[in-house]
Amino acid sequence: MDTSNQDQTARMDAYLRKQLPPEEMAAFEQELQENPSLKEALSLHLQALIAVRQAGFREETTQGLADPSPVVKPLNWRRWAVAASVAGLVGLGAWWWVNRATPDPQALFAQYYYQPEASLDVRGTQVGEDTTYTDLLSLYEQAAFTPFLSQIHEIPKDSLTLATHSWFQLLGGISHLEMQQPDSALHYFSRAHQHPYQQQWYTAMTYLQQTKLPEAKNLLRAMVADDQHPYQPQASALLKALE
């Protein structure tokens, strides 16, 4: 097994998801300028991710779930990236993406989007007769978005604090975004008032997925102007890429 190729793939994944420490991020970008082979490899890797996302590859499973509803599981990016390359999904557009003059909203979405964790302090709390918040959040974590959305609709509103209700609205929006349903995602995000930072970021990402660039840019500018905004670095980089 060639571990060097695996390490490079993991490093490219971390770079595209903005998960590298600042020093490593700067070093990687410098290496991109000096190493044409790395630049080509990154463009091929990114084009594979974009092709897979646009092709809509999804796996369905009911394993481990009490509800036999269809489950949409996250993509195994490395596996599908290789398959996409072999199948010819990676091609002439790779070099263009890295060296483009016009921003590609779908490519930028694939680069900047990530699914947040279901971090709540209500795990174990009873939701219904046979369901706890732990069960409910497990559906989200397993990417069982259809049953997750169905069950959050059944939670009595008076059983949730404003913050908890807001977080579930945010996760509902993410679920619809993962299922390529941006209109429904915007509806959920609009009700996540107790989490304004995440609300702004994921609403901007939804506009990006819809290629509504003026709306996305307006939100990104507001985030960049807020020095306290935790998404300011990502918003600033994305805004520069769009402009």
Image (cartoon, rainbow, N blue to C red):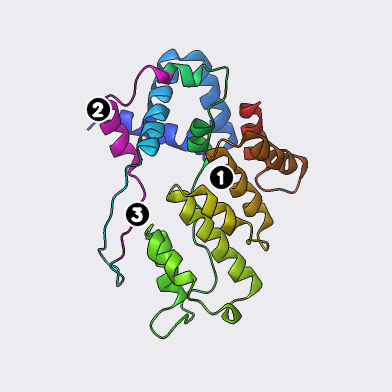
Q: Please, is residue 147 above or below residue 87 in the view?
A: below
Q: Are marks 3 and 2 in contact (CB under 8 Å)?
A: no
Horizontal and vertical percent for residue 209? 52, 40
Neighbourhood count class around disc 3 (C-alpha, 10 Å): few under 14, some 14–19, many 20 upward = many
Residue indicated by mark 1: 206
Q: Secondary structure at mark 1?
A: helix
N-terminal-most mark, 1 or 3 = 3
Callout 1 environment at 10 Å: few (<14), some (14 to 19), or many (20+)?
Answer: many
- Whole-angstrom CA distance, mark 1 to mark 3, is 19 Å
Give how far across and how far down residue 98 sits, in percent.
Answer: 49, 20
Q: Which quarter of the figure has residue 232?
A: top right
x, y percent for residue 25: 55, 31
- Identify the image quadrant of the N terminus: top left
SS category of the residue bearing label 2: helix
- Residue 87 is labelled as 2
Q: Which residues are magenta?
A: 69-94
Q: Are marks 1 and 2 in contact (CB under 8 Å)?
A: no
Which residue does the image show at 50% across and 39% down from the upper left?
Answer: 17
Indicate the amino acid at tag 2.
Ala
Which numbered dot is residue 72? Answer: 3
